[in-house]
Image (tube, helix red, strand yellow):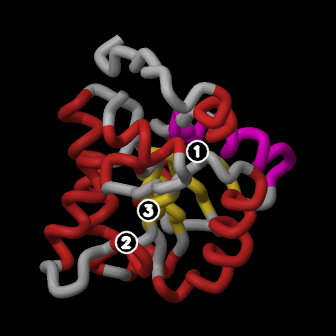
Amino acid sequence: MSVKVWLYSHGVTWVKEKDFDAFISFSYKDQDLVIQELIEVIEEKDPDIRLCLHYKHFLPGEFIQRNIRKAMVCYKRTVLVLSRSFLESQWCLLEFKLAHTQALRDHVPCIIVIKLADLPKEIQLYLKNTTYLTWGEKHFWNHLLYVLPRSQSVPKHQFRDYPRFPIPMANPSV
């Protein structure tokens, strides 16, 4: 049995960058709403979704651009919480541009856009060509939780039943 499997079966877990499902990009001016009404609700409704949050997971001392670039490349989805404050923030715009560039380069729909309020015409043009969610719309939570990826983890109880036998590992390339 591998050391990682043995440790996990005995309750030792760890999280690495690549273990996150989504990076959430938002303006600090919207943080009360986003943290309390979005992030905490996602974590409560579906604890299997692992969110990367700049205030928790960005490496201290690292250049902000490098932290942002890692977030765009290493996680399965980027959730952009669009508001007027988002559009006024140079860091949010950088996150937006990097996520969009990454999606175009990889040909993968990795951006989830949540529109918080009415936005200027320039961004409305972008939204006309993108599927997005509008904060507060009917079925918002059903749609959001449907599109967010989930970490695939093996429940701990499976290991407790057979701690001495190796568990066949799934082929990650399949």
Residue annotated with mark 2: 57
Instruction: From the top left corner, tell me how far across and down residue 161 is, in percent.
Output: 67, 29
For the residues marked 1 and 2, what is the alpha-carbon distance in whole angstroms? 26 Å
Relative to 168, is 153 above or below?
Answer: below
Q: Secondary structure at mark 2?
A: helix
Who comes first in sequence, dot 1 or dot 2?
Answer: 2
Contact between labelled residues 2 and 1, with CB atoms less than 8 Å apart:
no
Can residue 126 be spotted in the picture?
no
Write the residue at 69% across / 69% down: 40
Circle 1 sits in a helix, a strand or a loop, which is it?
strand
Q: Work out whether residue 23 or residue 47 is closer to the camera in this orientation and state it.
A: 47
Rendered image: mark on residue 132: 1
Residue bearing the label numbered 3: 52
Residue density around tag 3, few if under 14, some if 14–19, many if 20 or more, within 10 Å: many
Instruction: Report the side of 133 relative to 165 (left or right).
Output: right
User: The magenta stretch spans which residues?
Assistant: 137-152
In this rendering, the count of numbered labels is 3
